[in-house]
Amino acid sequence: MRAGGGALLEFNEVDVHFYRVAGLAVASEIELPGAIAAAPQAGAPDIAVRSGRVPAALEQASARGATWEIAGDKFLFRVPDVARFLLGGGREITFEAAPGVEAGDISIFLLGTVLGILLHQRGQIVLHASAVRVNDKAVLFCGPSGAGKSTLAAALAQRGFPLVADDFCAVTVSGAGAVMVQPDGRNLKLWAQAIQKLDLAERRGARVRNRLEKFFVEPAAVFTEPLPLGTVYALREARPPHKPAIERPNVVDAALILRRTAYRPALVNRMGQKADYFRAATAIANAAGIFHLTRAFNFESMPELVAQLERHWLDVGLTERAA
Amino acid sequence: MRTVWLASYPKSGNTWLRMLIANLSAKDDKPVDINDLPEGGGIASARVPFDRLLLIDSGLLTHDEIDCLRPRVYEELARGTQDDEYDEVEAPPAVRFVKVHDAYTLTPKAEPLLAGARGAAAAVVIVRDPRDVAPSLANHNGGSVDDAIAFMADEDAAFSAKPGRQHNQLRQQLPAWSGHVASWLDQKDIPVHLVRYEDLQVDTAGTLRAVLAFVGQPASEDEIRRAVAFAGFARLQEQEREKGFREAPRPWAGGNFFRRGTAGGWRDELSAEQVARIETSHAPMMRRLGYELATTAALARAG
């Protein structure tokens, strides 16, 4: 097993790929399509990704679910018939592919759940959100898978608001309570239907997995520096009794929104981050407005939604009216 | 805590039965708000519990890959695992009712999609005359009755299965109306209690009482009387008219979720030819469930 011993973060291979994910330097044995490529680094990366033997189970696991186990600073994650991933100390990721699996099938899970868990391991606040840049702030759109985060970010990028992050969003809180969003302006991942409805065919890249009608889409603009947090919107579908609106929830609900929007809520508790998230929720509530964004769930109303958001940014002072 | 599936083909009275059960514990002598029923974990095909418990983004998996993993989700939920561990765990109910429209199928790995006896202790299977299901399904889908009849005869039919988009829910296989009902009645993994929509209408209290006896959660006569009053079809329609129903299909401008709530409405809604088509497709199962056939052609075939 190569992932043992002292030289954990050193690679002997010639082919190492360098990326920047959520503000961290990543060196990987396999290509990670969709991640932002970085210049080769001489020093140790923040995160090393390599293939190797991964056990089917961890000894003395303190918590486990059907697809994952935690033992000390080790986290085992299994995507059945794709790969097993062993995450160590927030610094190294070892993967063992199932027979006959393509590299693309592994990288897509690496860039999603696996890095998300690793960020949890590093004690970072990770929100299930996409973000765009508005003036010099990051505006976040939160919600579970399927809530429409990427689609809205794509529509806003078309309107000239650069993509800052898609799907998960690493947030840091300084001692003084300043909240910064770490950029992760990777490609968007959009379903064929969204690409067609948003007229993004020209920006369509490779399939996310070759068996899915879901594609990488290069946003019209990306932004790759950390940004202070501007506004947070929790996406909600306009279904009875909720009508389309942008509303400020009460303080209790705002805190609840932020806690629920953790990238993987089940892990917050299991990985001892409850207090961190509570502190972050308070800092975010103080530093930025938190709103419910309730809208019809269809593509036809997207231009109207973008216009509504632009009006709201004027109202809350994120942008200024042209003289 | 025991998990019990409330299993039915769509538009067969599943939600009505859920409303009746929910109103057994109505507080302040007021009907339960139709938009307050637990929903996320309330239907087996919900996407969020899958993503949360397995940590895998279901949006990166094919329908078949998702199906292979779904049994793991139901096992965990039946053991009492909460899909949001962040909050304090509430005291679990003695019986956890979960709505399910999926047929009782096997995954590509040949295990029960709903995890057999590890996923639930029992199933209440609700059936309705397919001739009444068809117009209700047409209203639900915003399509024609003929389309609904064709869907109900299609062995490959499914909800939330279109490629190239993310559906709100996981794929639900609905392998023809007859096949769907047979899959539940003929499986041997868990005990089944059969409820006919028509009986629920004629004797709501008695049918509800029998369901509660089956699941081992008896209610007092007062509670049953109140639930029947609060979740009467007219009361549900009234609530939907007033504030809308969040489980209604998009767009809500179309039909109502609680449409007619009648038995035998097909007599004035379907043409003789449509009735014949339904009966030709489903005669054996209709006879098995006691739905009298109207067309002789179907009778001959069923004989």
Image: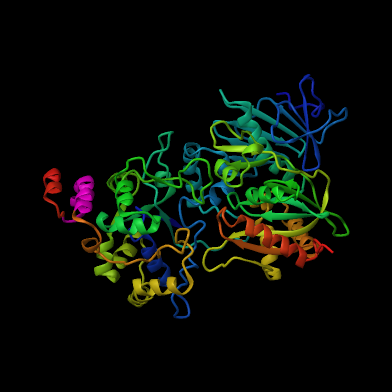
- Residue B186 place in picture, x, y as percent: 28, 45
Is B39 on the left-hand or right-hand side of A158? left
- Residue A209 place in picture, x, y as percent: 59, 33
Is A231 on the left-hand or right-hand side of B1? right
Snapshot quadrant of residue A84: top right
On screen, residue A181 above or below B65: below
Snapshot quadrant of residue A173: bottom right
Tell me which residue sits at (16%, 54%) in the image. Answer: B293
Snapshot quadrant of residue B218: bottom left
Tell me which residue sits at (46%, 47%) in the image. Answer: B160
Is B177 on the left-hand or right-hand side of A240? left
- Residue B298 place in picture, x, y as percent: 15, 47
- Quick check: is A291 in the magenta stretch? no
On screen, residue A270 above or below B60: below
Closer to the camera in the image, B287 or A72: B287
**Which quadrant: the C terminus of chain A?**
bottom right
- Quick check: is B275 in the magenta stretch? yes
Tell me which residue sits at (49%, 64%) in the image. Answer: B246
- Residue B76 place in picture, x, y as percent: 51, 48
Closer to the camera in the image, A169 or B93: A169
Q: Residue furthest front?
A: A323
Residue A121 in view here: yes
Magenta-colored span: B273-292
Q: Residue furthest bottom?
A: B29
Residue A126 in view here: no
**Which quadrant: the N terminus of chain A?**
top right
On screen, residue A68 above or below A236: above
